[in-house]
Image: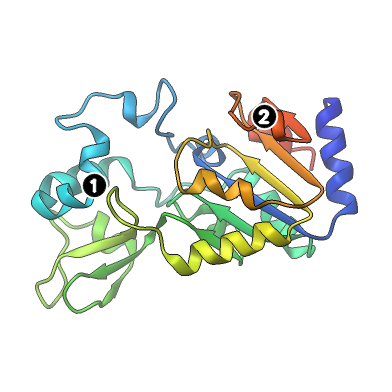
Amino acid sequence: MTEEVQKLKEIIKECENIVFFGGAGVSTESGIPDFRSKDGLYNQNYKFPPEEILSHTFFMNNPKEFYKFYKDKMNSLGVQPNITHIKLAELERLGKLKAIITQNIDGLHSTAGAQNVLELHGSILRNYCMNCKKFYPAESVFDALDIPRCSCGGIIKPDVVLYEESLDNEILTKAIESIQKAEVLIVAGTSLRVYPASGLINYFRGKNLVLINKDSTSFDTLADIVIHDSLGNVFQYL
């Protein structure tokens, strides 16, 4: 265990108001690829660039091609939470962790048992008919042979935020409020390059800002503790 991880252990032991803010790196150890690393989705070859496929315009104009990509690359059903998801849920049950803010859409924090999860970009586990708003589970989308359709004939859309779409204002407000009230903010598994999510860190006014990421970020110089390692290597000690 490194000196920095030991410091983090001591901070968590003493603190009763922790907020966790995580990105794709939280789920990579469950086997879910991230987007921006050299092996990520954005560096793979597709008929269209992933950023274009995952846009509102593309979804509306070419739903068939959208769902080919979505079913192939976004299906995390059957994927198990890793040690980071599990330890965070434990910290929440202990009353220390007040909120989990995530950029991920895989639903693994909830699967691990966490309750107060603020999903900035939505979740694959929630899906709605664009016509009548009827709710559908993820299986209805991923098991569909073609474009998933409601019993009314409308297209079923995942409750995920596509490019060109706005974040949910209620969730964003709750995330900001949680960060403003936190004594400790742990930011992990994110490059902090995507706005507006990256701007959330600026609302922190607490005692300890902790950054855990394999690569350096532009916020490293602002943090009280910086750990360049995989989350699994850190959270196994917490």
Can residue 85 be seen here? The reply is no
Q: Is residue 47 left or right of residue 165?
A: left
Q: Position of residue 228 (x, y in %)?
A: 67, 25
Residue 169, above or below 196:
below
Q: Which amino acid lies under the numbered mark 1 shown in the image of this protein?
A: Ser
Mark 1 or mark 2, earlier in chain: 1
Residue 72, by quadrant, is top left
Q: Secondary structure at mark 2?
A: helix
The reply to whether residue 208 is visible in this rendering is: yes
Q: Tell me: 32 left or right of 209.
A: left
Q: Is residue 187 above or below residue 33?
A: below
Q: Position of residue 215 (x, y in %)?
A: 58, 23
Which quarter of the rendered picture does the N terminus lie within?
A: top right
Say whether marks 1 and 2 touch (CB < 8 Å): no
Report helix, strand or loop for mark 1: loop
The residue under label 2 is which amino acid type? Asp
Tag 2 residue: 220
- Residue 233: image quadrant is top right
Query: Which residue sits at x=53%, y=33%?
Result: 191
Read off the residue under disc 1.
Answer: 55
